[in-house]
Image: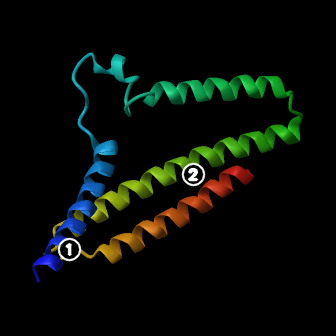
Amino acid sequence: MGKQYRILTAAAAIALSFGAAHAATNDAPPPPAGAHAMMGGPGGPGGHRMEMRMQKQLNELHGQLKLNADQEKLWQTALATMKQNHQTIRESHRQMRDQFKSMESQPILDLNAMHAAHQKLEAQNAQLREQTATA
């Protein structure tokens, strides 16, 4: 029993640390004053600044493409799809963190259920990424 208990305890600790690390990357308390300059803004290194750079690059690319009316509609559809799918993925990750937090409070941690939920989320997100790429 001792060896099995240690293995289960280690597996539970790994699962909990995965959930805590994942939550820490997205639900971390705000950094102290002045830290934004060091970290690159909200969301950690590059956070908001990276989004701004990407938006700037998209705008520059859009200006260089010289799209006709039909192509412009496709461009706008692709942008809208990208933004909507990005938001959907962020929301699904938030829901997954909440689900993992509720599982942590149970007396017996069901690692198979956690893995199945994670696999399902990844499959859904893969579909959204493919939809974005197609758009």
Task: Give the total of numbered labels.
Answer: 2
- Could you tell me residue 59's position as x and y percent? 69, 25
Amino acid under disc 1: Leu
Q: Nearer the viewer, mark 1 or mark 2?
A: 1
Amino acid under disc 2: Asn
Q: Secondary structure at mark 1?
A: helix
Q: Is residue 10 left or right of residue 96?
A: left
- Could you tell me residue 56's position as x and y percent? 63, 23
| Vertical relation: 38 (above or below) 124 | above
62 or 40, nearer to the observer:
40
Residues packed near mark 2 inside 10 Å, few (<14), some (14 to 19) or many (20 plus):
some
For mark 2, what is the residue? 85
Could you tell me which residue is drawn at 30 percent across and 65 percent down? 99
Could you tell me which residue is drawn at 71 percent across and 45 percent down? 78
For mark 1, what is the residue? 8
Residues packed near mark 1 inside 10 Å, few (<14), some (14 to 19) or many (20 plus):
few
| Vertical relation: 65 (above or below) 100 | above
